[in-house]
């Protein structure tokens, strides 16, 4: 009796939006899938800022990969491996994990996403954390919440207190705008009345943007609406501000080439400005000689494969892909979750076609629109409606639409329910329930740690209020 031929091996690197859609699309296809991720969870990045600002807990916006894909694992089609991919050997058709294990493939889908770019100033990373992973979000949450605590400790030094109560957000894309708006709400509503020596409502939130307007990817009218909504929340917006230096005392920036450098003393700086492709882009270049764009993304063929390697697909934020709509000039695919999902599905479908000896198809991105929220009851939205074209709206209706879309796309019924309940509670009470920080103050390297004997302090703010 002859043994059946082994199934084609598909290896997927990364279980973000692109990777998970590729794995799901291949369900039922006669292939043996290995999905590798450096974490054990799939993360819904669009709501990361809510974890960073204590509105939601980590499990509400993430889920264990094994649990999400348990049916494919149970059916014997899928193996999930926890590991950091560090190398690709395109000749031997295998990938290498950090611990030395090599995983062979017949078809490879690389979906390892993006990371922060500090525009050549990696030393800023220590002072201005960016937001990409759950670990980043929890780190930022600690810094934000402890900044208020440290301001309360600086009752006698007004300048030091002010610098703890000044928050700089660099980059006014959707993440920067969401962070700044929510921070202003925390300072003005959530924490107000919980401190005795400081008035949290005096906190400054400064949003620095190099471009002339906030939310530069949105139409100008919506940028203007967003700006007005930020102003209403008390966020100080500085557009045309090129950051020149960041350290543990704050940010320096220049508003124009010939303008003098301005210094903003801010002990908490959040980086929401630059995005660079995952380092696996460089590794793919080394392995296949493929081209990279300026952000380090892999320039892919119309069918999302690497030039000269029809067995290697790159999808999601790592791919510099173009949309090939019939009868139109190809246009770049934006680095957003619908783009990653559609690419993941497309790569999987093309693998299926190749297995049936059919020609692969070029990728066509369907743009449904864009959303960004600024704070409670304020958001901006563009939505593509068939026959009507692009609809643009802002304010309460855009915010409700934003809520609906984000809850709808969250993975897992339980997560949807919990997020809805948390948001409803927060809406009526202004509370942010995820404020418990497990790490002690000593884990914040830039906090005051030295021991000196100081004078006892009276609770000034409390006596003023009484
Ligand atoms: C804060 C934030 C807010 C956002 N908001 C929105 C939004 O509102 N709307 C929107 O459409 N898009 C938004 N985006 C963009 C969107 O999340 C991305 O476009 C999308 O996640 C890209 O999907 P991906 O599969 O390419 O990468 P990711 O979803 O980032 O997944 C990459 C996966 O690869 C894994 N990985 C990386 N390197 C390795 C390695 N070497 N070995 C093993 N595993 C590895 C990671 O752990 C991760 O699971 C946001 C992004 C961020 C960071």
Image (spheres, rainbow, N blue to C red):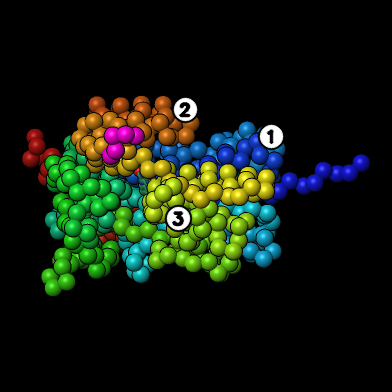
User: Closest to the observer: 76 or 452?
Assistant: 76
* Residue identifier under label 3: 321
Tag 3 secondary structure: loop
Circles 3 and 1, Cβ within 8 Å, touching? The answer is no
Question: Residue sitting at 19 percent across and 54 percent down?
Answer: 213
**Rendered position, 23 above or below 104:** above
* Residue identifier under label 2: 413
User: Closest to the observer: 335 or 154?
Assistant: 335
Front position among marks 3 and 2: 3
Circles 3 and 2, Cβ within 8 Å, touching? The answer is no
Front position among marks 2 and 1: 1
Q: Residues within 10 Å of mark 3 (few under 14, many from 20)?
A: many
Question: Residue sitting at 55 percent across and 36 percent down?
Answer: 68
Q: Position of residue 293 (x, y in %)?
A: 42, 65
Tag 1 secondary structure: loop
Front position among marks 3 and 1: 3
* Residue identifier under label 1: 75
Side of 182 relative to 36 (left or right): left
Circles 2 and 1, Cβ within 8 Å, touching? The answer is no
Using the rendered view, name the quadrant where residue 201 is placed.
top left
Question: Residue sitting at 28 percent across and 34 percent down?
Answer: 388
Side of 170 relative to 155 (left or right): right
**Which residue extends farthest right?**
1
Q: Residues within 10 Å of mark 2 (few under 14, many from 20)?
A: few
| The magenta segment | 386-390
Using the rendered view, name the quadrant where residue 245 is placed.
bottom left
Q: Distance from label 3 to label 2 (Cα)?
A: 32 Å
């Amino acid at each position: 009796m002859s043994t059946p031929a082994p199934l084609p091996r598909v290896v997927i690197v990364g279980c973000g939006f692109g990777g998970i859609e590729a794995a799901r699309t291949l369900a039922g296809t006669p292939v043996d899938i290995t999905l590798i991720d450096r974490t054990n969870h799939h993360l819904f990045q669009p709501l990361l800022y809510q974890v960073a600002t204590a509105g939601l807990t980590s499990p509400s916006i993430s889920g264990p990969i094994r649990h999400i894909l348990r049916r494919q694992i149970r059916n014997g089609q899928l193996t999930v491996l926890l590991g950091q991919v560090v190398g690709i050997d395109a000749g031997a058709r295998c990938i290498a994990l950090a611990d030395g294990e090599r995983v062979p493939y017949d078809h490879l889908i690389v979906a390892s996403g993006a990371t922060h770019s500090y525009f050549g100033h990696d030393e800023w990373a220590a002072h201005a954390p960016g937001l990409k992973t759950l670990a980043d979000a929890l780190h930022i949450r600690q810094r934000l919440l402890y900044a208020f605590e440290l301001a309360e400790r600086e009752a006698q030094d007004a300048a030091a207190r002010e610098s703890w109560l000044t928050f700089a957000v660099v980059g006014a894309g959707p993440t920067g705008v969401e962070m700044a708006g929510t921070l202003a709400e925390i300072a003005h509503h959530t924490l107000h009345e919980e401190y005795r020596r400081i008035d949290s409502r005096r906190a400054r939130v400064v949003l620095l943007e190099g471009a002339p307007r906030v939310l530069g990817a949105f139409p100008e009218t919506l940028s203007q609406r967003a700006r007005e909504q930020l102003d209403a929340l008390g966020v100080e917006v500085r557009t045309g501000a090129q950051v020149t230096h960041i350290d543990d005392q704050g940010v320096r920036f220049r508003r124009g080439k010939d303008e003098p450098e301005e210094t903003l003393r801010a002990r908490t700086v959040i980086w929401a400005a630059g995005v660079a492709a995952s380092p696996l882009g460089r590794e793919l270049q080394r392995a296949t000689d493929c081209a990279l764009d300026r952000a380090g993304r892999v320039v892919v063929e119309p069918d999302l494969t690497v030039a000269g390697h029809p067995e290697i697909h790159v999808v999601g934020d790592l791919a510099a892909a173009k949309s090939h709509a019939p009868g139109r000039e190809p246009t770049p695919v934006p680095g957003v979750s619908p783009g990653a999902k559609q690419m993941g599905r497309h790569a999987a479908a093309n693998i299926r076609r190749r297995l049936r000896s059919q020609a692969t198809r070029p990728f066509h991105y369907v743009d449904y629109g864009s959303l960004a929220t600024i704070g409670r009851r304020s958001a901006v939205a563009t939505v593509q409606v068939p026959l009507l074209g692009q609809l643009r709206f802002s304010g309460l209706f855009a915010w409700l639409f934003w809520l609906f879309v984000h809850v709808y796309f969250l993975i897992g019924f339980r997560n949807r329910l919990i997020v809805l309940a948390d948001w409803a509670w927060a809406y009526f009470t202004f509370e942010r329930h995820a404020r418990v920080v497990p790490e002690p103050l000593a884990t914040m390297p830039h906090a005051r740690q030295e021991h000196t004997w100081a004078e006892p302090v009276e609770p000034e703010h409390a006596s003023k209020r009484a």
